[in-house]
Amino acid sequence: MPSPYLEILRSPRVAAVLLLGFSSGLPLALTGGTLQAWLTVSGVDIMTIAWFSWIGIPYLLKFLWSPLMDRYVPPFLGRRRGWMLLTQLALILGIAGMAFSSPGANLWRLGCLALGVAFTSASQDIVIDAYRADLLPAQERGMGAAVGVLGYRVAMLASGGLALILADQIGWRQTFLAMAALMGVGILTSLAAPEPAVRGTPPRTLREAVVEPLKDLLSRPGALQLLALIALYKFGDALAGTLTTAFLIRGIGFSLTDVGTINKALGLASLLLGGLVGGLLLVRMSLVRALLLFGALQAISNLSFAALAWAGKSYPLLVFAVGFENLASGMGTAAFVAFAMALCNHNFSATQYALLSALASLGRILFGPVTGGLVEAMGWANFFVLTFVAALPGLWLVWRMRAQIDAVAEAQPRAG
C-alpha cells in the first residue's frame, strides 16, 4: 500500500507549489541581502544601507492593491495564473534594469529600480500565495507549505549565495542578468500549473473586494488575537535577519565568498532537511504543537549569531549558526504558512493572505532602519539577544490561543 507521504510528494499540486516558491523567493534576496552586500562592498555607510531596507516596504503594504488581483481576471490563464505570468514578465525587465546600474555612479537610480522590483515581486507573492491557498486540499497543506518554503529558500540561495559568488567572479552586471534569466522557471510553471479544483467567486465590485475580506477575517472568534499572533510569530526571526549579511561581512570580517558558500550555500542542506522534517511533522502533529516547537527553535537560533559575535571570526561557529538558523527558520515558516492558508477564504484569498503576510513582515521591513541604530548603540551580540527576546511574545500567544488555532486547523476551506 503506497505511503500517504509519498502520495503527497508525487502530487502535481505540490510540485507546482515548489516551483512557484522558487519564483517567489528569487527577487527577495536581490533587493535584500544581495543588494545589501553590493552596497557594503561599494563603501556605502551602514545607516544608508539600513535605510535601503525600506525598499521592502511593498511587501508590507501589498494588501493595499491585492483586492485588484481578487477582483479582476486577466483574459488568459485564469484569475491566479494570469496574474502570475504578468508579474513574472515584469520582474525579468526590472532585474535586468538593476544590472545596468551601480551604487557608485547612480545610487538613487539603483534604489528606484530595486523598489520597482520589490513592488512587482510583492504583487507576484500576492497571487502565488492566493493560488497556493486555493489549490491545496487540507491533507496537502503541511507538505505544500514545507516545499513552498524549500523552493523559496533555494531561490534565495541562488539569488543570495550563488549571486555573491558570481559577483566575485564575473561582476554585478552579469550576475543580475543571470538572475533575470532564472525567472523563466516561474513563467514555465505558470503556463503548466494545474487549476484549483475549488475556485472562489471573484468579488462583484472593487468595494466588495476591499471590504469583504477584512470583514470575513474580523468575524472569526478571537480575530484580533489571531492577527496579533500573525504579526508576532516570526517577529524576532525577521528582526534578526535584517542585517545578517552586513554583520557577517563588516561585523565579523568574512569575505563575500565566505558568506556565499557558507552563509548561503550551507543553507541549502539544512533547508532540505528542515523542509522534509517540517513537512512530515506537520502531517503527523497538531498545528499548535508545530507552531510552538518550530517557533521555539527559530527563537533560540538567533542566540547562535550572538555567540558568533562574542567569539569573533570562527568558521565552525559560522557553520553551526547558519545551519541551525536555516533549519529552524524554514520549519517555523512552514508552520506559519500552513496556519495562514487555513485562515483564508477562497473568494478573497489574495487579499487575506496579503494582509496576513504583510503583518508577518513588520520586523523585517518597518523596523529595518531602527536595527542600524540598535547595532551602533548596543553592539552585534546584544542586538541578537534582543531579537531572541522579541520572539517570546509570539510563542506566548500560540500557547494562549491553542484552542482557536486547533479550530482554524480543523475547519474546511470556505468558498462561495
Image (cartoon, helix red, strand yellow):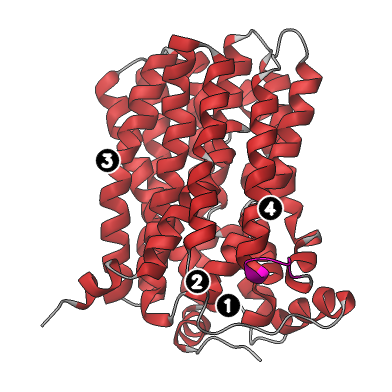
Quarter of the C terminus within the rendering: bottom right
Residue 334 vs 99, above or below: the answer is: below
x and y percentages locating residue 36 in the rendered image:
60, 24
Q: Tell me the residue that label 2 is attached to.
A: 339
Magenta residue span? 73-79
* Res 118 quadrant in image: top right
Q: Tell me the residue that label 4 is attached to.
A: 86
The residue depicted at 50 percent of the width and 74 percent of the height is 135
Q: Considering only order in the chain, which callout, 3 or 4, is on the residue closer to the N terminus?
A: 4
- Which amino acid type is shown beneath numbered disc 4? Leu
The residue depicted at 40 percent of the width and 42 percent of the height is 154
Q: Is residue 152 left or right of residue 88?
A: left
Q: Secondary structure at mark 2?
A: helix
Q: Tell me the residue that label 3 is attached to.
A: 269
- Magenta span dominant secondary structure: loop
- Which amino acid type is shown beneath numbered disc 1? Leu
* Res 331 quadrant in image: bottom left
Q: Residues within 10 Å of mark 3 (few under 14, many from 20)?
A: some
Q: Secondary structure at mark 1?
A: helix
Q: CA distance from mark 2 to mark 1?
A: 7 Å
* Res 263 quadrant in image: top left
Q: Secondary structure at mark 4?
A: helix
